[in-house]
Amino acid sequence: MGREEFFSPSIDDGCLPYCYACHVQSFSFLHRAVVATTRTFMRLLPVRITPSAWGKPALYPVVFEGEEFLVRKYMPDRAVLREVWEKRCYPAPQDGDIVMDIGANIGAYAVFASRAAKHVYAFEPEASNFEQLSQNIRHKKNITALRLAVAGSAGTRMLGTPRMSRNRSSLYDQSKGQEVHCVTLREAIGRTGASVIDLAKVDIEGAEYETLLHTTPEILRRCRSIFLEFHDGWTSHTYPELTAHLTQAGFSVRLRRGLQYWTQGTGYIEATRN
């Protein structure tokens, strides 16, 4: 059904990549408790102000590889940018690709992808993030920002928005939030006007399960490649359900897990259409 790649720092639990029984055993009650505790701690933890940000205004510019971004002093915006531009956690598109950035945050990946892509469609529902996204792409004519959440069904829902960590806004967070409009993946693809999406990057804090599992193989196959971050422990679903669904839709699947999987329940799935 796919293959698993453990990246540094790595822990190999000795299980077959998609043995569901083994996964259920590994994602035990203790593991769920660790993930829940870590999530709560990280949501409440104040943002660490690095020495380079001391004395800076509430909004200040930073530059990565010649691209300027406005970041918020008391939000983890710099960490989001480093994840994309320094750690290279997400794949680069090919020249001329049509890209969907679902969970675009402040535009870190959208701008990164726009350097090669023909066009990037950036979906971000959270108000403060969307404002920063709009600022950061204002000079990019090949990026379109849409203030929409992508979910399993269309409609209005509450988006939990931790005050000091807007990059972890989630439809599954019970903290004080804001109303957002949701569209399905089918509708999101329709908003682009493209018949085929070359690369869909998905980072939506637990909503990836309902979004993808409620999408038919026919619609999924409109994407040539899907790269997503999964969040086990946020819902009753676990990553083998995603890998099975994508495999049945005709994708080759590669899984990447590291230390963060055991503390936060997160990892990456790269699915490429056969």
Image: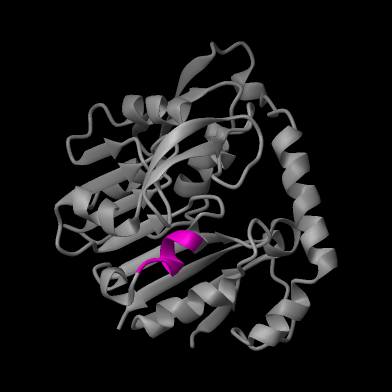
Is residue 11 one of those drawn in magenta? Answer: no
| Image quarter of residue 99 | bottom left
User: Horizontal and vertical percent for residue 271?
Assistant: 40, 73
User: Horizontal and vertical percent for residue 165?
Assistant: 61, 33
Asked whether the viewer can see residue 92, the reply is no
**Residue under the image location 60 percent in, 47 percent down:** 172
Give the residue at the far front of this rendering. 155
Q: Is residue 117 above or below residue 12?
A: above
Q: Is residue 50 above or below residue 252?
A: above
Q: Which span of residues is magenta-colored?
A: 210-215
Q: Is residue 129 above or below residue 239?
A: above
Quadrant of the drawing holding the C terminus: bottom left
Q: Is residue 87 left or right of residue 65?
A: right
**Residue under the image location 20 percent in, 54 percent down:** 190
Asked whether the viewer can see residue 6, the reply is yes
Q: Is residue 261 left or right of residue 149?
A: right
Image mark count: 0
**Residue under the image location 45 percent in, 38 percent down:** 105
| Image quarter of residue 18 | bottom right
User: Horizontal and vertical percent for residue 100?
Assistant: 30, 53
Q: In front here: 87 or 151?
A: 151
User: Horizontal and vertical percent for residue 167?
Assistant: 55, 38
Check the image and tell me how it is coloured.
one colour
Q: Main secondary structure of the magenta part?
A: helix
Is residue 214 one of those drawn in magenta? Answer: yes
**Residue under the image location 42 percent in, 65 percent down:** 212
Q: In front here: 17 or 161?
A: 161
